Amino acid sequence: MKAKEAVNRRNKIKSGRSEQVIQVLIYCVVIGLCLAIILPCLNIAALSFNDGKDAAKGGIYFWPRMFTLDNYKQVFKDGTITKAYIITIARTVIGTAASLTVTSFAAYALKEKELPGRKILTMLITFTMLFGGGMIPTYIQYNRLGLVDHFSVYVIPGLVSVTYLLMMRTFFESIPESLEESAKLDGCGYFGIFTRIVLPLSKPVIAVVGLYTAVNHWNDWFSGAFYMRSSRLWPVQTVLQQMLTRAMANKEVTSVAQAIAQNTNSVTSDSLKMAAVIITTVPILCVYPFAQKYFTKGAMIGAVKE
C-alpha cells in the first residue's frame, strides 16, 4: 500500500509539473503575440512624433529621438484628412444606424414562424453568403442605380449583412415566446412587441452588431477607391490607402507633401504616413474598451444557424 501511495504521489507531482510547464508555455505564447502586436504600434507612434529628417537616419524604435508635432500639423494643414474624417464619421453613424434598423426588422420578421415562405426566404438569404455577383457586375449595377460617385454608395449596399441578420434572428428566437403571447393578449401588435419587448431585451446583440458594423464602415477603403470617381467623397481609409500606395512607389504622398518638401526638411513622406496611420486608427480603438464586455457573448451569438 505504501508503495502504491508513493507511486501516486510521484504521478501527481509529475502531472502538476507538466501542467505548470504547459501554463508557462501558454503564457509565453500569449505574451509573444501581444508583443508582436504592441511593439509595431509603438514604433509607428514613435516615428509619427519624431522629426522626419532625423527618422530617416534610422535607430528609432519605441520612443521618439527628436520629438515634434510637425507631422500632425502638416497632415491637417490642407484639410484633406479633416474632410475625409467628416465623410468617415457621417458614413459610420448613418450607415450603422440604418443597418441596425433594417437588419433588426428583417431578423424579427424571419424569426416569426407564421411568416409565409419563412424557410425559403431564409435559404435564399443564406445562399447569398456563398456566391456574389462579382466586382464588375456589381459596379455596373451600382452605376445604373445612381450610387457611383454618391455618398449613398457607402450606406445602401451595406444595409443588410446576412451574418448579422442570422445573429439577430438567432438571438430573437431565444426570447421566451410567453412574453410575446402575453403582449398579444394585452392587445399589442407586432410592431409594439418588437419595440417594447424584443428590442429592450436584445441590447447585447444590438451592441455587438452595431460595433462590428461601425468598424466595417470605419475601416472600409474599397468603396471610396472603386466607386468614387473623384476624391471629394473619399473616407479616411481611402485617403490613407492612397498615401501608402504612393509612398511605397517613392512618390509624393499628396499635394500637401509636395508643398512640405519645398518649405521644410523636417517632415518626410514616411513621417507623414506614420502620423496618418495613428490619426485614422486611434479613434476607432477608443471604442473597443466600452464594448469589450459584449465581445465574448457576441462571438457566440448566431454560432448555430438553422
Image (tube, rainbow, N blue to C red):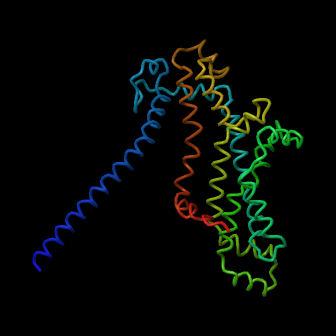
Residue, x 60% and y 38% (percent of image)? 280
- Point out the image quarter for the C terminus: bottom right
- Tell me residue 26's x, y (percent): 35, 53
Residue, x 69% and y 84% (percent of image)? 178
Q: Closer to the camera, 177 or 12?
A: 12
Instruction: Tell me where residue 9 sits by quadrant.
Output: bottom left
Q: Residue furthest bottom?
A: 185
- Point out the image quarter for the N terminus: bottom left
- Tell me residue 255's x, y (percent): 67, 20
In the image, residue 195 above or below residue 129: below
Q: Is residue 90 left or right of residue 247?
A: right
The mark tally for this picture is 0
Q: Closer to the camera, 204 or 14?
A: 14
- Tell me residue 260's x, y (percent): 60, 17
Instruction: Tell me where residue 82 sits by quadrant.
Output: top right
Instruction: Tell me where residue 246 sits by quadrant.
Output: top right
- Tell me residue 270's x, y (percent): 54, 23
In the image, residue 179 above or below residue 283: below
Q: Is residue 140 left or right of residue 222?
A: right
Q: Closer to the camera, 213 or 36?
A: 36
Residue, x 58% and y 44% (percent of image)? 283
Q: Residue furthest top?
A: 262
Q: Closer to the camera, 256 or 4?
A: 4
Residue, x 77% and y 42% (percent of image)? 134
